[in-house]
Amino acid sequence: MMRGLSVAGLYLLTAVLLGSMLAVTLQGVLSYPFDRVLTRSVLLVLLILLIPLWKMVSKETSGLIFGDFSFRQFSQSFLVGIFILAIPVVALLLLEVRLVAIDLEISFLSILGILLFGIVLACLIGFFEEILFRGFLYGSLKKRVGGLTAALVSSALYSSVHFLKPTGELELPINWLAGFIYLERSIGNMIFLHQDWDARLSLMILGCFFCLVRERFNLFCCIGLHAAFVVGIAISRQLTTVNLDSQFLGLISSYNEIIGQLVSLWLLLLVYAMYRSKRNKKSLVYSS
């Protein structure tokens, strides 16, 4: 377990260092604020470093067995993900926690362009996060501590990194230390579990759900589902607005105003259904 966490820590620190150096170089070319250049540079390096990280572990551990990839299965998992997310979103609309707010002035071509760009971006996000958390981290931990502990630990980390961002204004020096200063100022927000606890819980249960999907199917199905959730949440936030007068407002988190207690309950039901399905499948195999 410690080796897996050590590799993950080294991977992160290396990406922060190289990303900071890249950001300093790009700052002289780009006109964006330095903190935006820094975070994008670190993300780019994180993505590139997946290549040597992939070569350090077996295909079975990382889950990147390209022979398992099927575009049809990936597309199906994406559509299933949209359907899964649609259930709580429709429930929020029926409870009037969110209200439809469509801007009719937006042209069809603009909507189509935004949608296609969003799908591509969501696939990249899903690819990166699933390879890192349900691939390398979960796969490495499972070999040492078992599937249940691996799922809980990797999902807890997956949930926590979504809150790895500084609170308030942050002045960053334009040098190779910038990434480490950003990281140091963000750790507190990451570990304050009482802040946005409902969103943290939703993301942790979602991580466990993805672990079950990897076990039952493969990592590419996780990527398809993940991409669908990113697209679905973005579209839902674009087409609806929060009803601040709703008596059920506590069902959503202030994190993105979609996930929260209702989504957590729905995901728990899905996790339980998949877990029972997996056990029943094993029982049938043993009985035969």
Image (spheres, rainbow, N blue to C red):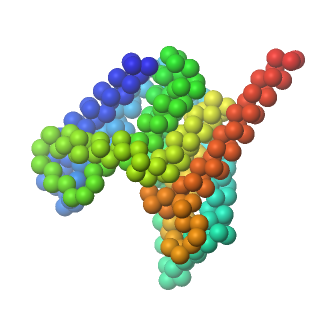
Report whether 218 appears left or right of 109.
right
Q: Residue placed at 81% from the left, 23% from the top?
A: 283
Which residue appears at 46% of the width and 28% of the height? Answer: 137
Q: Is residue 10 above or below residue 272?
A: above
Residue 239 seen in the current view:
no
Most foreground residue, 267 or 37: 267
* x and y, in percent, of residue 207 in the image: 54, 39
**Figure quadrant of residue 260:** bottom right
On the image, which quarter does residue 101 sit in?
Answer: bottom right
For this orientation, the residue located farthest to the bottom is 105
Q: Position of residue 244 (x, y in %)?
A: 50, 73
> In the figure, is residue 213 to the left or right of 162?
right
Residue drawn at point x = 60 percent, y = 28 percent? 67
Q: Quadrant of the N terminus?
A: top left
On the image, the x and y values in percent for residue 179 come to 21, 42
Q: Position of residue 277 (x, y in %)?
A: 75, 34
Residue 283, above or below 256: above
Say whether residue 88 is left or right of residue 105. right
Q: Residue at x 54, y 48 (%)?
A: 202
Examine the rendering and report whether any part of residue 176 can be seen: yes
- Image quadrant containing the C terminus: top right
Up-down relation of residue 245 to residue 71 (above or below): below
Q: Give the number of marks.
A: 0
Closest to the observer, 287 or 83:
287
